[in-house]
Image: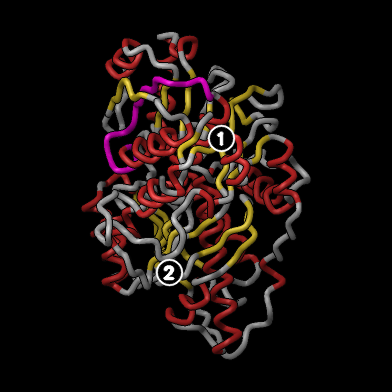
Amino acid sequence: MKDNEKKVSRRDFMNQMGVAAGAAAVAGAAGAVVAPQVAEAAKPKGKIPSKPFKTGHITFLTGPAAILADQSLKGHILAAEEINAAGGLLGKRKIETIQADEAAGTDANVKEVRRMKLQENVELFTGVISSGNTPAIGPVCEELGMLTMFTDGCTDFLFDVAVPEPHYIFRITAIQSSDGVSAAVGSAREWPEVRKIAHIHPDYSYGRNALEHYTLAMEKFLPGIETVSVGWPKLGTTDFTPHLTKALSAKPDLLCTACWGGDYVALYKQALRYGVFDKMKWAATLSHGTPPHAVGKDHPEGTLAGVHANFYFTFPEKGKWPIKDRFVEAFKKRWGEFPGMSAEGAYVGLNMVRIAIEKANQLVGGWPDDDAIISMLEGLGYDGPAGYYYIRPDNHQGYKDATSGFSKNYAEYPFSAWDLDKVVTIPVRNITAPPNWPKPGKGHNDSTATANWIKTTWPSMSG
């Protein structure tokens, strides 16, 4: 028997993974240092031009996806306004942003990226929500030599296959595989009795990856589980009746969904009418990743309420992580609403570029070229609202510890929120393939490096 085939208890393995919940999770997040504010940067060296620094930002501004995605632009704008209020990048270059609607479709988005670079002379491209778009846009940004910070579009495929050796492009959001695996960790920890699982996922790369990584991890945690139903609604679906009735007829113990934005809101409200929540457990990878106000008080308590393993505005509780408190307060003051994960990702992404520019300036003087900025982004650490971020030099992917929660209603909020006594956190290194793990086509044919790593290294569990 191979080492990874030895039976271990589920509890012991989760302890080895560093899984924490409730008070332990909050305590783990409490001991960090507050990041310096923009105004505390070192004095710039050399001559800095006053020409505005143009950025391009694409996200969904219309359609059902905009419920989640328009906060990406708001987070970007908030960061830009704070930087500009301190004088701009290196105290002199004010940020200007050109925006476009991701709902125009992949081909139109690719054309817009080219236009931004070639006609508008954009120096930094940011944004993108859909996993169906980053693999198309990423290679184009590399071709154009366009410094890029994707703030979502989380698919592993981007850096595993589409751009396996990136130079100009980076991404700050949690990678898709960590999203699916963290949802499985929360599900198996909360409901170890589950055996039959139904799925409803959007019919494109994010949904396909969510099904695969969630199932792969659940099969390790709960040997003998069975997938009894799978529904594939198109992105933008408004009627989930056929998918819900199919799932109900299979009589599962749990239903898992990766629907998001307006799609998720429509799904859960229709599920209420069918009594789904009375008949099975419910695990959603992105239910509470939308802006908090989008998920109503009618959302059932006790469901796994994922945020794409990223950020929720109440966690940790106020006073435990001042960086988060400051961001939430500033966002609420600027936009009149609480921030969701897309807002936080865009805010962090632009600030990490700012810090890389400041560090590069201290080394080379004057305005640093893209290669100097890139060298500072590689391996950069940052204390952000969701915790500590790190950009791995080998794949330009941002990493931070993964988190998921469970829904609960609080009197102070007119919407469903997280139960702070049940938040689950996991060190990202324990649910993500390590640096230089073989990518698809390099010794294995699994869809992602993480999928192969789980199959190769995770033990089977005995309960």
The furthest residue to the left: 107
Residue 289 seen: no
Residue 323 seen: yes
Up/down of 209 relative to 246, above or below? below
Residue 193 painted magenta: yes
The furthest residue to the front: 1
Q: Please report the residue visible at 38 percent of the width from the left and 66 percent of the height from the top.
A: 169
Q: Report the side of 189 relative to 5 (left or right).
A: right
Q: Secondary structure at mark 1?
A: loop
Total labels: the figure holds 2
Q: Are marks 2 and 1 in contact (CB under 8 Å)?
A: no
Q: Inspect the image, locate mark 2, and give the three-letter code of the amino acid beneath it.
A: Asp
Q: Which class describes the residues within 10 Å of circle 1: few (<14), some (14-19), or many (20+)?
A: some
In this view, the residue in front, 76 or 445, is 445
In the image, which disc is placed on residue 59?
Answer: none
Start and end of the magenta stretch? Answer: 192-207
The furthest residue to the right: 319
Q: Position of residue 442 (x, y in %)?
A: 27, 62
Up/down of 152 relative to 191, above or below? below
Q: Please report the residue visible at 54 percent of the width from the left and 17 percent of the height from the top.
A: 298
Q: Position of residue 57 (x, y in %)?
A: 41, 57
Provide the residue designation for mark 2.
394
Q: Position of residue 426 (x, y in %)?
A: 58, 45
Q: Which class describes the residues within 10 Å of circle 2: few (<14), some (14-19), or many (20+)?
A: some
Q: The N terminus appears in which quarter of the rendering?
A: top left
Q: Report the side of 217 relative to 208 (left or right).
A: right
Residue 420: quarter of image: top right
Provide the residue designation for mark 1.
9
Residue 94: quarter of image: bottom right
Query: First in sequence: mark 2 or mark 1?
Result: 1
Residue 7 painted magenta: no
